[in-house]
Amino acid sequence: MMKLFFVSEKRQCRTMMSVTGILMMAAISLSVGCSNKSIDTKASVIISKQSKVMIPFLQKNGLFRYVDEDLKPVIDKEFFLASKFSTKGYAFVYDKDFRQGIIDVKGNFIRDFSDKTYEAYDLGTLTFIEESREYEKKLPVWKWDWNIMGSGIDKTATFSEVTISVLQTGQKIASKTTNKDEYEKGISLDVSPLDDSHFVMNEKLYEIKGNKVKEIADKIYFTFTDDRVLVSEKNGNALFYSFDGKLKNTKELKPVKEISIQANGKTIVLDSLNETRYRQRPANATLLKDIKTNEIFPYPNFDKAFPITFSNLSDGQVSFLNKVTLISSVNKTPYFILGTFNYDKWKYDYKYVDAKGNFLPSIQAPDFFILGNVGEILWPESDQIISPTFIEEGYQVKKIKKVYGEDSLFFVQIEKNNVAKKGLWNSKKQQWIIPAEFDDIGILDEQNLIVSLRMEKEGGYYLYDARNRKRITHKTYKSIFADGLITNRTGPNKEEKYYIDIFTGKEFKE
């Protein structure tokens, strides 16, 4: 059966800017939080804001140099590879040995070239830096891996060392070394901002005061940032907190795998609900019971109790309840979605109830989706998003995915005889923004709907302005990233990387 996720589409003030995702040795990204505050000048390390356009420009000698919009050099240094500058005024650069460093807008090194890899995240006035490296280490004899098949003895192991700190001040926030062979849980720069002064990272809640970061709570396993609700764990139970600068406990719930309901006076035990491969705990449980009231709260936001008494049901409704394997609470509504898996069609059949146990013919939940294991939309069903009359004859809708941050845009994949084609659909206007004729579509700029299109699997991508229905480039590339970094084949097993303007197609190379 399909693994499920339940999401409510909300606009979040957070962008991910891919910088060098296709590099041979590291994938680096800059994540920029929502703040208009300037850098605190009292910080021991000052990172000045970028005052003018600074573009990584590929020269004939194969090295990058930063230039302005007139292509005049602005930094008197060359690099083997370079990223664009962040809004805080720093960039990632590489030398010929593919060692990574960080520079400011004057070309000064904030981090020298080394074998470490970096990721960065801007929040409020601060920039958080993750520094990581892998290395081999000899093990004590009692930890040697003795291979009984006679292929030798492993006397070393690969370790991963990760440190997260504040770039402006050097304050260390977290540090951990893990043995990769033992699959230990490490730490990462996975920030969930609550506001410019509070964030959750690695299951801890932090507060920013001035230039200092302070941990104020531990074991934060889940966050509903839209509603400023945090979930912690205590003795295997989930503790819910409302958050407004301070934590306020609202309820304590425990994970459950089954529930009992009354249908026309008879008891039905539902024991195969929202099944997952993962261990049940507050971090991933989909059904939680209030330890005081015994009320059942379903995923995703656990915002209301599920009805356990149903009356005046038809035989068909009772039969449906007996087979329910999916229960989802629709956020900020009185509705629940119930699903039974139809093995003949390999999809769910759905019915709807409210918090009082009434069956409903339909519900209005325009921004709510139930997702499958690779992000495809399972609910609403495809014909509620796109009518079959808009699908090419002989083809069927195979997958639909939401375009993040957009109210009515969807990637639609149609198939016929195992041949798949993709398009971009506007459900509000009931029209194709991009016809379902392409092998792949990538959103590069959500606000302006600049996309990359590839007609055939072995072909190249070109830039397209979907909002104005206009092709930007006739030249194609092996790959195009949101920040304008492209890869281009130059010969057998050879390729080059440089930047282009995704709005005009202008190439920044000699």
Image: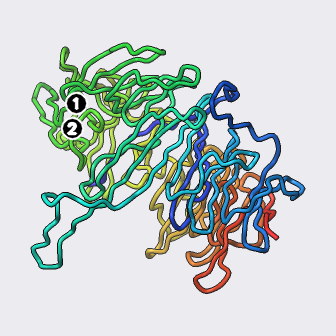
Q: Which image quarter is the N terminus in?
A: bottom left
Q: Nearer the viewer, residue 408 or 54?
A: 54
Q: Residue at x 62, y 43 (%)?
A: 428
Tag of residue 303: none
Up/down of 109 relative to 293, above or below:
below
Q: Position of residue 469 (x, y in %)?
A: 75, 58
Up/down of 427 relative to 97, above or below:
above
For the residue marked with disc 2, what is the amino acid? Leu
Q: Are marks 2 and 1 in contact (CB under 8 Å)?
A: yes
Instruction: Locate residue 125: give its quadrant.
Output: top right
- Residue named by callout 2: 321
Q: Secondary structure at mark 1?
A: loop
If you read the primary sequence from the N terminus, does the residue marked by circle 2 or circle 1 appear first? Answer: 1
Q: Is residue 294 left or right of residue 227?
A: left
Q: Answer few, some or many: residues within 10 Å of disc 1's Cα (few below 14, many 20 plus, some between 14 and 19).
A: few
Up/down of 487 relative to 71, above or below:
below
Q: Position of residue 228 (x, y in %)?
A: 46, 23
Q: Position of residue 45 (x, y in %)?
A: 64, 34
Between the residue at mark 2 and the residue at mark 1, the CA separation in whole angstroms equals: 10 Å
Tag of residue 313: 1
Q: Position of residue 279 (x, y in %)?
A: 21, 43
Mark yes or no: residue 352 visible. no
For the residue marked with disc 1, what is the amino acid? Leu
Q: Nearer the viewer, residue 355 or 177?
A: 177
Q: Is residue 419 left or right of residue 438?
A: left
Q: Residue at x 63, y 64 (%)?
A: 95
Q: Secondary structure at mark 2?
A: helix
- Counting every numbered tag in the picture gives 2
